[in-house]
Image (spheres, rainbow, N blue to C red):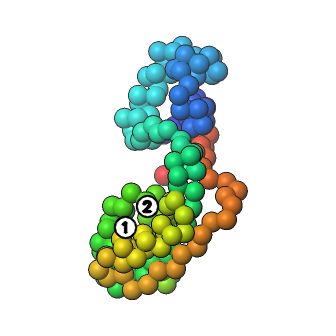
Amino acid sequence: MIDAIDARILKIIRTEGRISNAEVARQIGMAPSAVLERLRKLEARGIITGYEAKMNPERLGLGLLAFIRVRADEPVHSMGVGEALAAFPEVLEVHYVAGEDGYLVKVRTKDANELGAFLRDKVGSIPGITSTMSTIVLTTVKETSALPVPEEEPKQ
């Protein structure tokens, strides 16, 4: 269960991953050692699962963002196609979804030509895929991995 102090710590570090422990402690009015102990407990409980650097995809030559709906003839919940899709470096996310499509896949490539080659050469090589439908993003209004932090963990 997280308490109000854990929630405050999480809200600070979710957007400022490189903030020092001392600065977090200063912002919430606690000793740095107490904050460090709370962070270690949040990590041990699996609430904090890692730390990542945010990168500018355009600066890395990955200016095209697309979502691909993938249909497959695999048995329900077998996940073989999903695991094969997840293995490609262009793939950022793979979700098994309800509805007609089996998977929703988020992909980044250099441009439309590279997306076409990805679909043809990589996605097309996966056994069991029956169709794909791609949607190219024109403008991203919001994209974040920062989760909303509740004040306290819900009672179960």
Residue 154 position (above or below residue 23): below
Which residue appears farthest toward the front when viewing the image?
A: 113
Total residue callouts: 2
**In this view of the protein, which residue sits in the foreground, 111 or 26?**
111
Task: Write down the residue under mark 2.
Answer: 91
On the image, the x and y values in percent for residue 109 come to 50, 61
Residue type highlighted by circle 1: Leu
Which kind of residue does numbered mark 2 sit on? Val
Report crowding for label 2: few under 14, some 14 to 19, many 20 or more residues within 10 A (C-alpha): some
The mark nearer the N terminus, 2 or 1, is 1
Residue at image location 32% in from the left, 68% down from the top: 84
Vertically, is 134 above or below 152? below
In the shown orientation, is residue 6 left or right of residue 80? right
Q: In the image, 58: left or right of 104? A: right
Rendered position, 37 above or below 153: above
Please state the horizontal and vertical placement of residue 154, each as a whole percent of the image: 54, 48
- The residue sitting at 39% across, 38% down in the picture is 45
Disc 2 vs disc 1: Cβ atoms closer than 8 Å? yes
Marks 2/1: CA–CA distance: 7 Å
Measuring 43% from the left and 60% from the top, which residue is drawn there? 90
The picture places residue 48, in percent across and down from the top left corner, at 45, 39
Per the image, label 2 sits on a secondary structure element best described as strand
Which numbered tag is attached to residue 85?
A: 1
The residue at 58%/50% (across/down) is 58
Percent position (x, y) of residue 116? Answer: 47, 73
Task: State the image quarter where residue 117 is shown.
Answer: bottom left
